[in-house]
Amino acid sequence: MANQQIILSLLSQLRDYLSKMKSLEPQVTSWKTFEKDWEKEWQIDRGLQLLIECSIDIGKEIITGLEIKKPTTYQEVFIILRQTGVVSEDTSKKMQDLAVFRNELVHDYLYLDREKIYNVFKNDLKYFERYLLEIGGFLKKIKPC
């Protein structure tokens, strides 16, 4: 895969973003602490956007390297990754949901329920860990060019 170095760099960046997000968990222990601290809310909002964008970029690079059908939406990135056996069905579905959430963060920010941001932060970071593991497993199966 000619773009494996790019993918490895993006994976490293995703790990860094995830580590930073996890470091916020002890500081945001409840909806009330989140709701009262706009700085943490903004950090989490932006952090989630970066996690999702980086995950999408990793998927797009893998798809480019495999020289297969190009996705037309962010959700389709994760559908194609599932169809080619790069990620599991469960991970694909959750990452598709997160791609939709990313669009809400970026485009519907005026109407986005703040509690939804909090819930994604509290409940969905594990899917980025799973995504990292599954992508890593896929990369171990292929030979670098």
Image (cartoon, grey):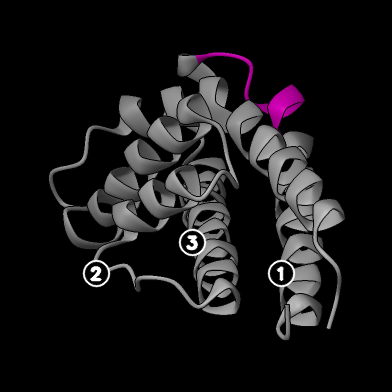
- The residue that label 2 is drawn on is 72
SS type, badge 1 = helix
Residue 37 part of the magenta segment = no
Location of the N terminus (image quadrant): bottom right
Quarter-of-image position of residue 11: bottom right
Measured along the vertical axis of the image, is residue 125 above or below residue 62?
above
What residue range appears in magenta? 24-30
Task: Indicate left or right for 104 with 119 as reference.
Answer: left
Please identify, in this view, whether the residue under mark 2 or under mark 3 is nearer the observer.
Answer: 2
Location of the C terminus (image quadrant): bottom right
The answer to which of 28 and 94 lies nearer the viewer is: 94
- The residue that label 1 is drawn on is 10
Residue 28 part of the magenta segment = yes
Quarter-of-image position of residue 76: bottom left
Please identify, in this view, whether the residue under mark 2 or under mark 1 is nearer the observer.
Answer: 2
Q: Earlier in the sequence, mark 2 or mark 1?
A: 1
Q: Earlier in the sequence, mark 2 or mark 3?
A: 3
Q: Residue at x 35, y 42 (%)?
A: 96
Where does the image place residue 82, in percent across and percent down from the top left? 47, 43
- The residue that label 3 is drawn on is 56
The kind of residue on which mark 3 rests is Ile
SS type, badge 2 = loop
